[in-house]
Amino acid sequence: MIKTLRIFLVMLFMAAAGFLYKVTYKGSNISYFSYIFIENMGHGTVNQSDGAMTVGTTKHSKFTAEDILSGGNNIIFLETSERLQLPSLVLCAIESAAQVYPDRSVVVFMKGLNHTDAEDREKVLSHYPSLLSLDNIHIFPLIMEDIFNNTPLFNWYKKINTTLERYWIHVSSDGCRLALIWKYGGMYMDTDIISMRPIPHMVFLAGESNQYSSNGVFGFSPHHNYTWTCMEDFVQNYDGNGWGHQGPHLFTRVLKTMCTLPNFNNTEDIMCGNIPFLNPERFYPIKYYSWEKYYTVWKELPTFNQSYALHLWNFMNHKHKSMLPGSNTLVEHLYQQHCPTTYAALQRNESIYI
């Protein structure tokens, strides 16, 4: 009798465990804060005590987005288009950031993952061979409703008709970066920024020109007043038809309510209240109207000694120019130095997405 009871209890326990596994991990709707499995070939250590998994020595990594983001020291990239086959410049941006900031998590949010099943999500990182050797890269689906929740942007997002939006990919990215940095802190970077050396500030804004702020790269602590004020302005003064109105124009509008911005002097940074406003040389030594210089051969290569990273102005690149191995262009030299694994794959004519 006792033996029969034991067998029954064991079978009941196994059935319950199987049901829990199915509900927790095999559901078709995986929320932004649900467990995401990412294949990280040969990297990842398991922390069984809290159900999370960090990157280290095993083949599969399991963790929550909130586990990673809660550290407040992340570098965030966004892909708000549906594409999964990322261009080499995006991979170079991610690789270079992971190399320059080995002690920080590089978190990539991809909208295209929202429409893939759980099995594909498990293998997402393995699709990008040039990123596999970097332990600090994490990829998650970009679920806007979760990102905007508990921010001033939530009601705006629920009401917006995205089919009527002229610049929705860009406007949604403008909103997501604000919400994520406000919630979790860290640094945001556009996917056409190649990192070269660490930025020595946790809180900063990047000047694109005199008295004009970029929103392509910035850093703040969690729940900072500036990012909250930007989200409020985003909704109150929304204009989806004006290019940059929800992005750099918004950042500049809010910054100018906090101080009177002087012009930059040589390569010096300035302060606006307690926010460092970094000189355009830090990220924009080549201006937007000269973006093609990145794709030309220079007689003498610039050193960019005053820069932390370079913005390559991909929005201006209507000719779809790209880095070509052997071209001796400035962008080729940048790839060689700052994303060598991506460059080597292109040089060998290997696929960067499999």
Image (spheres, helix red, strand yellow):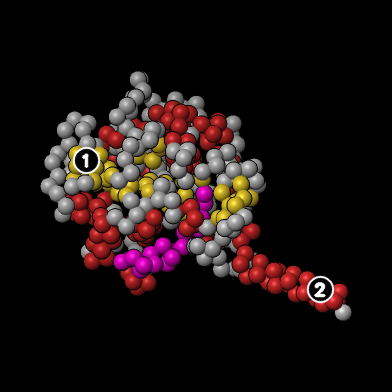
- Indicate the position of residue 194 as horizontal and vertical percent values: 40, 37
Q: The N terminus lies in which quarter of the figure?
A: bottom right
The residue tagged 1 is 209
Tell me which corner region of the image, top left, top right, bottom left or bottom right, holds residue 25: bottom right
Q: Secondary structure at mark 2?
A: helix
The residue tagged 2 is 6
Q: Which residues are magenta?
A: 138-154
The residue closer to the viewer here, 29 or 116, is 29
The residue closer to the viewer here, 10 or 71, is 10
Amino acid type, residue under disc 1 in the picture? Ser
Q: Relative to 279, does residue 107 appear above or below in the rendering? A: below
38 on left or right of 300: right
- Indicate the position of residue 3 as horizontal and vertical percent values: 86, 74
In percent of the image, x 55 and y 65: which residue is there? 30
* Disc 2 packing (10 Å; few <14; some 14–19; many ≥20): few
The stretch drawn in magenta includes residue 152:
yes
